[in-house]
Image: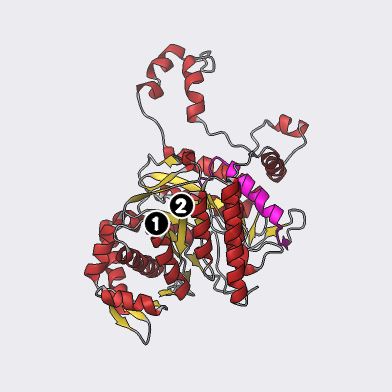
Amino acid sequence: MLKGFSRNIKPLELLTDEQVSVIHRGTLDVLETTGLTFDHKETLAFFTDHGCKVDFNKKRVRMPGWLVEDCLRKAPSSFALKARDPKNDMRNGGNVLYFANTVGMGDVDLDTWERRTPTREDNINSLKVLDSLENIHNIGCYTPYMEIEGIPPCMTMAEGMADKLRTSSKVNQEAYQQDSEVFTIKMAQVAGTQLLGTVDPAPPLTYDESACKAMYRWIEAGFPVDIGSGAVMGGTGPATIAGSTILNNAELIGGVVFAQLIEPGAAVQMANFVHPMHMQKGHPVFGAVESALHTAIFAQMFRHYGIPTHNWLGFTSGKKIDFQGGYEKSMNALVTAVSGVNLTEIHGAIYGELVWNPVQAVIDEDVAGWIGRFVEGVKINEETLAVNLIEEVGPIPGFYLNTKHTRKWWRDEQFIPKVADRESYGEWVKTGKKDIITRAKERVAELIADYEPKPLTPEQDREIDAIIGEARSYYKQKGLL
């Protein structure tokens, strides 16, 4: 099982106990008084059968406070995820921190910084890179590309899942579109793995038909559900961080109630993607400090509820691999980690969910390692305090390099990045003055060249091909192919 990083520091807490209670009461009020829209007739009837007040004309479900709190108690505080290779199994929850990759609609030319549509080969090579990175514990939704040259949009999820299962033996997340989860669930079952299935309410306060169907399907398959929402503050959510926290809480907890009514004890994880709006331009702002503040509160609330958490804050507003992208991504990722979130996505995104590149992913691998080392904290014991050693070495000309203590401890204490430049200035000049993008390009090429595949069995391959054929037939009948 992948151990991830053990968080040995006290989580950041921005809220007082009274403020936690105020947000909780506000959330219950929204769920009971305002309610959520569920745009699915069978789900409306389902909630009626479980004591909710349902307006079938408006498709509105109002959940009584006692039911909400009962369902919150039933949600487990951690859950296991089965990978294709047992050494890559995961257990989300508690004080564990895992990392996953982000996603993007397309790729980018690193010379011109123009977007381009990735090929199938680009997609597979990117998966090879992600599978090779030590701090990628979980392969994210999509492939990592949402658009692939030559693949019809309706087939992207199914074809992408086939690529993921044939390339990586790690746990996969998976989204849904136009019933794609019907086919990706079958593929995962053939490969002997579980998916972390997503269900995403649409702010404000709405579960569409596809989200409702996906919830039933993931749970019936025995897969944990990652319930994620992301209002745009000032657009699809209140302009205030506190108000958007109430809205986000209601959307996510409404999903917890839904899942626990389907199957008490169903494994769920809460995912957060709240951003402010650019109030002059009208689009979301990625990498903002307001997102970090919201994340810290989100994490504190769901620690209070005892439910694992997931954050999608690896996106930036920068358009290049540059300092802006670096600080926006790193600062949000660090706040996410020290706030107690269990799974965070940072690898690969350049601008929002629009652009993704493996060169960025290997740079972000260093960021993940740095953050992971930070949350592991400092060991304090007689040996690490080194009082006797300090006495032994004494003042100048005393030196610590040649001591047994240094030889024993330095590797445990120091994080060593893979692509960051740590040479002296003179060595940097002599070796060609390479910047981090050049070094990361070389690292990507090495990972692809050295990649050792983890193939499925021939029978599994044939069954996945057959499922792809089923998907194509289904979408042809729907007029999408």
Q: Which residue is mark 1?
A: 222
Above or below, comparing residue 345 to residue 261 in the picture: above
**Mark 1 secondary-structure assignment:** loop
The percent position of residue 223, horizontal first and vertical second, equals 42, 56
The percent position of residue 101, horizontal first and vertical second, equals 55, 52
Q: Is residue 294 visible?
A: no
Along the horizontal axis of the image, is 174 left or right of 449?
Answer: left
Mark earlier in primary sequence (2, 1): 2
Q: In what quadrant of the picture does the N terminus appear?
A: top left
Q: In what quadrant of the picture does the C terminus appear?
A: bottom right
Q: How many marks?
A: 2
* Residue drawn at point x = 47 percent, y = 72 percent: 210
Quadrant position of residue 21: bottom left
* Residue drawn at point x = 53 percent, y = 62 percent: 183
Q: Is residue 33 magenta?
A: no
Along the horizontal axis of the image, is 355 left or right of 223?
Answer: right
CB-based contact (under 8 Å), mark 2 and mark 1: yes
Residue type at tag 2: Gln
Q: CA distance from mark 2 to mark 1?
A: 8 Å
Quadrant position of residue 9: top left
Front residue of this view, candidates 480 and 347: 480
The magenta segment: 115-138
Residue type at tag 1: Gly
Disc 1 packing (10 Å; few <14; some 14–19; many ≥20): some
* Residue drawn at point x = 40 percent, y = 42 percent: 7
**Mark 2 secondary-structure assignment:** loop
Quadrant position of residue 439: top right
- In the picture, the disc for residue 265 is none
The percent position of residue 348, horizontal first and vertical second, equals 61, 52
Q: Is residue 183 visible?
A: yes
Q: Which residue is mark 2?
A: 194
